[in-house]
Structures are given as C-alpha cells and as structure tokens.
Image (cartoon, rainbow, N blue to C red):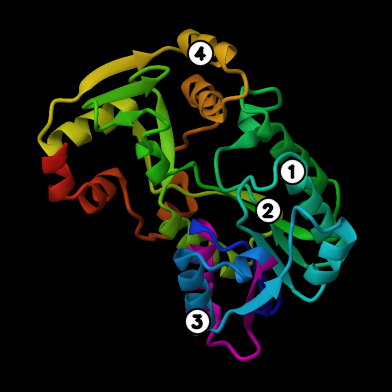
Amino acid sequence: MHHDKAILVLGAGELGMAVLRNLVRRVGKAPGGSISVLLRPSTLASTSPDKRKDIEELRALGVDIVPGDLAAQSVAALADIFARFDTVVSCTGFVGGPGVQMKIARAALDSGVRRYFPWQFGVDYDVIGKGSAQDLFDEQLDVRALLRSQQKTEWVIVSTGMFMSFLFEPTFGVVDMEGKSVHALGSWENAVTVTTSEDIGALTSEILLAEPRIVNQVVHVAGDTVTYRRLADALDTLLNLKLHRTEWSVPALKRELAEEPNDPIRKYRVVFAEGRGVAWDKQRTFNAQRGLDVCNLEDWVEQNLSVDQRSAI
C-alpha cells in the first residue's frame, strides 16, 4: 500500500463506478487511504436522476469529489489537480474526441504522480498497430509511446477486450435479438475477448494493489474469449432458440465502411473482423493466474437475458 494512499479516478461512468466501488472496498478502510473522483462541474450540477443517484452513491461510499473538465481544461490545469495524488486511473472512455487521451497522459506525466493507468481498457493496440480502421486506436498507441519514453511515472495498462455488454448492443449488430439472428465478424472461428465492467473494476483494483507491485506493463484480463460460433451456440442452447446465422466477411465490412467512412460502429466491426489483437488465451490472463472468479459468456447470458426477455424474443 506504500505508494497508493491517494487515488484519483477520472470519470464515473459504467467503468469508473465499478472501479470506485472496488477500490473503496479494498482501500477505503486503510489508514491514510483516500479515493477521489474527478467529475465535470456540469455533471455535479446535473438534475438527471441517474447522475444524482451516482453522486449520492459516491458520497455514501466516502469518495471525495473533485471538480474538473478533461476536455476543457489545459494540460497545466489538469496537472495541478493530479499532483495531489499518488495514482491516477483514467476511466473516461473516448470522451471529448481526438487528442484528449494524449492530453490526460501529458498532464499525468507533468503532475509528477507516481503511477498512471491510462484509458486503455480494451483491445491490444500494440498487436493491432497503427493505421487500423478505427482511427481512435492510433492515439492509444501514441499514449503508449509517450508513457514508454519516460522513466519518472510508472504506468500500467489493463487490456480487457470488449465490454461484455457491447457484444449484445443492437447497434453493434453481432447479436440481433429482434431479428433472431447472429452475425460473425470475419468468420465463425474468429474470437473476441470480453469482460464485464464489474469484473474490470474488480480486476483493476487487484492489479493496482498487487504485491509485488505491477510496474510499466500491459496486463491482460478476460471474462471470456469466445468464437462467434460459440456465441451463437450458447444463445441457441441457453435461450432455446435457433438463431439465423450470417457471416460478415472483412471485404464486405470494409465496403460498408467505405460507404459511411465516419461511422464508428463500422470502424469497430472491421477491426474485430480482422481478428488481430482482439482476443487472447484466457488461461494466460492475470485473473486465471490468480484464480480470480469472473463472469463468462454463459453466466452473462443467464443473468442478463432473463426469462421475460426470452419470451419477448
């Protein structure tokens, strides 16, 4: 615990809340430990019931709320905020458009914090490389290069694959419950690594507090690594269905992207269909090596596609 007394989490979306709950459980009781969250002033002033509920939960958990705006404030202003903490964990997602991830990383380095967890909760950008269909990924590689170019601030990257729930997002189009169909991205043998946001929150806390300390490395976790065939088979079996199966080839997905070159969902589909850096062996993950329980594909389907939803399908 020597270095991680004061921890700042950036953002309280689905992942930020999961990280905060788990950190409070683990650190909140430690003498001298403090957990804080950076929230936009507009979020703090919001009257939306969901936002109010999250803010009330954070206050009940004893999380300190720090006002700040990652998109609007300068690197220097953000560095001033970060400087009060030992560890900064970015849970912001791709907010604020291009350049914001680099800006946050620069602020973290300039602030002199001891340790930084950038927003890299996703696929393995090193394997995918520059110039992929999803241009947001190039900035993720620039962030990695920046962190690797220096020795002062320790960094940890947590590669989680896709959020489990995103695999079932109607807009993503892999699972279409309305249309009783499932689409393979690239091929039925192609695989994708998926982890629930709750598990990412728990595992990130474990990684942050692990002894011996984890320093300057990419740590892979996985709730599950599944082929599109296993996904289709699991849905058929667990929901007692016979989903219509269609394979979406890489050339077809690239043609669709060419028609709508700015569509982020079409960009993602191409990257996942290409199948590089989007799946890794679950046995070799941090959670498997530590024997930590995670929610796998079948668990998720059973917990989230309830009997009511099944009969509505």
Q: Are marks 4 and 3 in contact (CB under 8 Å)?
A: no
Residue at 57 percent of width and 17 percent of height: 260
Q: Quadrant of residue 124?
A: top right
Q: Nearer the viewer, residue 269 or 223?
A: 269
Marker disc for residue 61: 3
Give the side of residue 78 with respect to residue 223, left or right: right
> Which region of the structure is painted magenta?
15-41
Q: Are marks 2 and 1 in contact (CB under 8 Å)?
A: yes
Residue at 35 percent of width and 22 percent of height: 184
Indicate the quadrant containing the N terminus: top left, top right, bottom left or bottom right: bottom right
Amino acid beneath label 3:
Leu
Q: Which residue has dot 1 on it? A: 144
Amino acid beneath label 2:
Pro
Front of the two marks 4 and 1:
4
Mark 4 or 2, nearer chain start = 2
For disc 1, the neighbor class at 10 Å (few under 14, some 14 to 19, many from 20) is many
Q: Position of residue 111 (x, y in %)?
A: 85, 65
Mark 4 or 1, nearer chain start = 1
For disc 4, the neighbor class at 10 Å (few under 14, some 14 to 19, many from 20) is some
Q: Nearer the viewer, residue 136 or 130?
A: 136
Q: Height in image: 162 above or below 115?
A: above
Circle 1 SS class = helix
Mark 2 → mark 1, Cα distance in angstroms: 9 Å
Marker disc for residue 256: 4
